[in-house]
Amino acid sequence: MQRRFWLWLLPVRYLTARSDAPVEHVLRRLQAVVEPKGWLRNPFSCSHRRYSGTVTADAFSLVRRRFVTTRPLPTVVGRVRPDGAGSAIDVTLRLPHFHLAFLGVWYCGWLAATVAMVASALLHGFQWACLAPPCVLAVAHGAVLRALVIESVWTRWLLEDLAADPR
């Protein structure tokens, strides 16, 4: 599939890994690293797994567990499908729905401020304050994409570990 440049601007990432292991084997390995979702969690327990979420017969949805979260962690939604003699793991990383809704409203507000500042600059002459809204918008979007890039590295490591076939 051909990737377009503007897709990197969206807060979503797509990853695929291929494995020589059958689908059932990959799902068993995935269930070994994912614990069920829960509202309460003992932070002093050492028995927690690295990810929390759900694993079904051919799909999964999980989030990386962290004791302290300083950035929104993307949801990893994927499907394990047969691929020749082995299997393929297709994954989509996206921000949680609440974060996407918040970013949509926030971006629209900053975009409206940017349009107003540009109109003011065209009518009344350029002022350095006109650069504030687009700069803040760019920095905020960069922070969101940075979080996705960092989490995509963690997810790629998970996929490589799942795709490995230790028979």
Image (cartoon, rainbow, N blue to C red):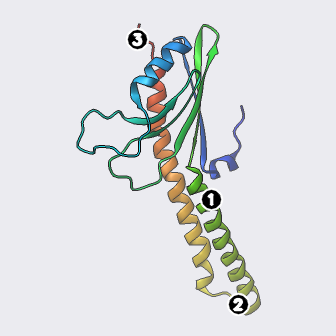
The residue type indicated by label 1 comes to Ala
In this view of the protein, which residue sits in the foreground, 7 or 158? Answer: 158
In this view of the protein, which residue sits in the foreground, 33 or 2? Answer: 33
> What residue would you read off at disc 1?
101
Task: Please tell me which residue is depicted at 52% across the width and 47% down the height of the picture.
Answer: 148
The residue type indicated by label 2 comes to Gly
Above or below for 150 versus 107: above
Q: Earlier in the sequence, mark 2 or mark 3?
A: 2
The label nearer to you, 2 versus 3, is: 3
**x then y, percent, for residue 53:** 47, 36
* Cα gap from disc 1 to disc 3, whole angstroms: 42 Å
In this view of the protein, which residue sits in the foreground, 110 or 119? Answer: 110
Q: How many marks?
A: 3
Q: From the viewer's perspective, tell me whether residue 75 is left or right of residue 68.
A: right
> What residue would you read off at disc 2?
125
Q: From the viewer's perspective, tell me whether residue 31 is left or right of residue 47.
A: right
Question: Could you tell me which quadrant the N terminus lies in?
Answer: top right
Task: Please tell me which residue is depicted at 41% across the width and 35% down the height of the picture.
Answer: 51
> What residue would you read off at disc 3?
166
* Cα gap from disc 2 to disc 3, whole angstroms: 67 Å
The label nearer to you, 1 versus 3, is: 1
The residue type indicated by label 3 comes to Pro
Task: Please tell me which residue is depicted at 33% across the width and 43% down the height of the picture.
Answer: 41
Query: In the structure shown, which secondary structural element does the residue marked by tag 2 occupy?
Result: loop
